Image (cartoon, rainbow, N blue to C red):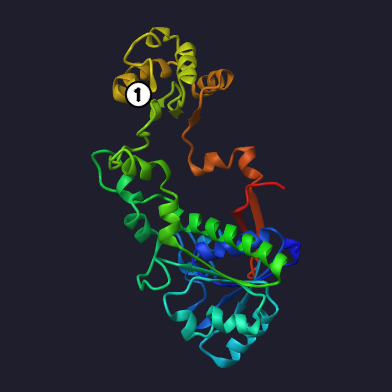
């Protein structure tokens, strides 16, 4: 099936589910988002910054994840509205939901009910902690429960949540992958599928090396700011001559040798305290102290140019304005006209090209 011929009905709100709907909209699918008018629609419509208009029908947050969708207002607790949604689902390829435990059955939009209307339907469900766990799962809760918050922050500071709802984003990616597999299955068998993903499982699946640092290394990851527990210098920050903040991500001995070369610090290469990555991790604070005054002599532009020439991973720490001043970030933007006539910008959820 061509993805631009898909019909998707989104019975989801907030971030994870709508991110999946927007993914399919970006692929050209017809995505219909169902919002309850009696509750004001998707709750993120009201998640506004102090600088946003209180009278606007939507927030910047809402715009970030609802590009390219047709919105239909329907109260599923009302038989007439529910029937209208059933008619859409009878013709749909995919339904996306993220109801609290039991709410899907109460509203008549659980998989058993909808698959009876449309046996070829692919039903994508997001839960917080699994189908039988009643806990409500906002991203903050999941960051705390799955170790992300404990690991994040400065060494002597409090646990800190990530500034993006990363668990929602990771869960959306998990569901996208599962739905694409279900589409392939339906092409082969003609049968629909029930696909379920939890925020909790998606977060655990993303712990990567921090999980194995515990499972194999028997070491509980601690707060280290931006530092990497296994690599140095990696995450250390430096201030250039023009007062811009820079960060290094040196992942190999060759890269470290080249860093020393561009800073005229060749003596560090023969120093046994820094000759291997393991030694650099052990003596990382001393290493940072030695690198700092040399980097401070260079402008950020000159330092980064030298790093590029010698393939040393480094970057300027940018704020959001600076990020989108880059042409490579500009190509990731989408624009749309909202129902009230205002223009909205958001970032693509798709970063690949086919």
Q: Residue lying farthest left?
A: 156
Residue in the foreground of this view, choosing between 190 and 118: 190
Q: Residue lying farthest front?
A: 189
- In which quadrant is the N terminus drawn? bottom right
Q: Quadrant of residue 178?
A: bottom right
Res 54 seen here? no
Q: Return the x and y of residue 103 as percentages of the image width and height.
A: 45, 80
Residue at 49% across / 80% down in the picture? Answer: 104
Residue in the foreground of this view, choosing between 270 and 166: 270
Q: Quadrant of residue 176?
A: bottom right
Q: Is residue 216 left or right of residue 307?
A: left
Q: Return the x and y of residue 11 as percentages of the image width and height.
A: 55, 74
Q: Please rate how many residues cluster around mark 1, counting C-alpha atoms within 10 Å: few if below 14, some from 14 to 19, many from 20.
A: some
Residue in the foreground of this view, choosing between 206 and 167: 206
All told, the count of numbered labels is: 1
Residue named by callout 1: 278
Looking at the image, residue 332 lies above or below residue 118: above
Residue at 36% across / 34% down in the picture? Answer: 227
Q: Return the x and y of residue 305 as percentages of the image width and height.
A: 56, 21
Residue at 66% across / 45% down in the picture? Answer: 331
Looking at the image, residue 183 lies above or below residue 163: below
Q: Residue lying farthest bottom?
A: 79
Q: Is residue 152 left or right of residue 24?
A: left
Q: Quadrant of residue 194?
A: bottom right
Q: Secondary structure at mark 1?
A: helix
Looking at the image, residue 226 lies above or below residue 233: below
Res 138 seen here? yes
Q: Return the x and y of residue 38 as percentages of the image width and height.
A: 50, 83
């Amino acid at each position: 099936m061509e993805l631009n011929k898909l019909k998707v009905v989104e019975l989801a709100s907030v971030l994870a589910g709508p991110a999946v709907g927007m993914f399919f909209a970006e692929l050209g699918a017809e995505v219909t988002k169902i919002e309850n008018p009696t509750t004001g629609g998707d709750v993120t419509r009201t998640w506004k910054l102090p600088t946003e208009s209180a009278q606007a029908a939507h927030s910047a947050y809402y715009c970030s994840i609802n590009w390219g969708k047709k919105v239909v207002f329907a109260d599923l607790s009302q038989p007439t509205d529910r029937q209208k949604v059933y008619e859409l689902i009878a013709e749909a390829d995919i339904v996306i939901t993220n109801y609290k435990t039991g709410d899907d059955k109460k509203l008549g939009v659980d998989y058993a009910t909808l698959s009876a209307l449309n046996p070829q339907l692919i039903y994508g469900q997001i839960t917080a902690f699994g189908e039988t766990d009643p806990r409500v799962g906002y991203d903050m809760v999941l960051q705390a429960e799955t170790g992300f918050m404990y690991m994040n922050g400065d060494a002597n500071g409090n646990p800190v949540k990530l500034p993006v709802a990363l668990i929602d984003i990771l869960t959306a990616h998990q569901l996208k992958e599962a739905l694409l597999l279900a589409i392939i299955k339906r092409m082969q068998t003609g049968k629909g599928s029930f696909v379920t993903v939890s925020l909790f499982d998606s977060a655990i699946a993303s712990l990567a090396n921090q999980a194995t640092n515990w499972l194999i290394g028997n070491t509980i990851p601690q707060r280290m700011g931006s530092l990497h527990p296994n690599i140095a210098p990696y995450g250390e920050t430096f201030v250039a001559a023009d007062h811009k903040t820079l960060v290094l991500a040196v992942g190999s001995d060759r890269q470290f040798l080249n860093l020393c070369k561009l800073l005229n610090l060749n003596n560090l290469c023969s120093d046994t305290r820094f000759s291997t990555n393991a030694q650099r991790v052990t003596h990382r604070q001393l290493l940072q102290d030695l690198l700092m005054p040399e980097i401070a002599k260079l402008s950020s532009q000159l330092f980064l140019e030298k790093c590029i020439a010698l393939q040393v991973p480094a970057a300027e720490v940018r704020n959001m304005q600076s990020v989108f001043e880059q042409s490579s970030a500009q190509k990731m933007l989408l624009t749309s006209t909202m129902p009230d006539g205002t223009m909205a910008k958001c970032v693509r959820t798709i970063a690949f090209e086919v």
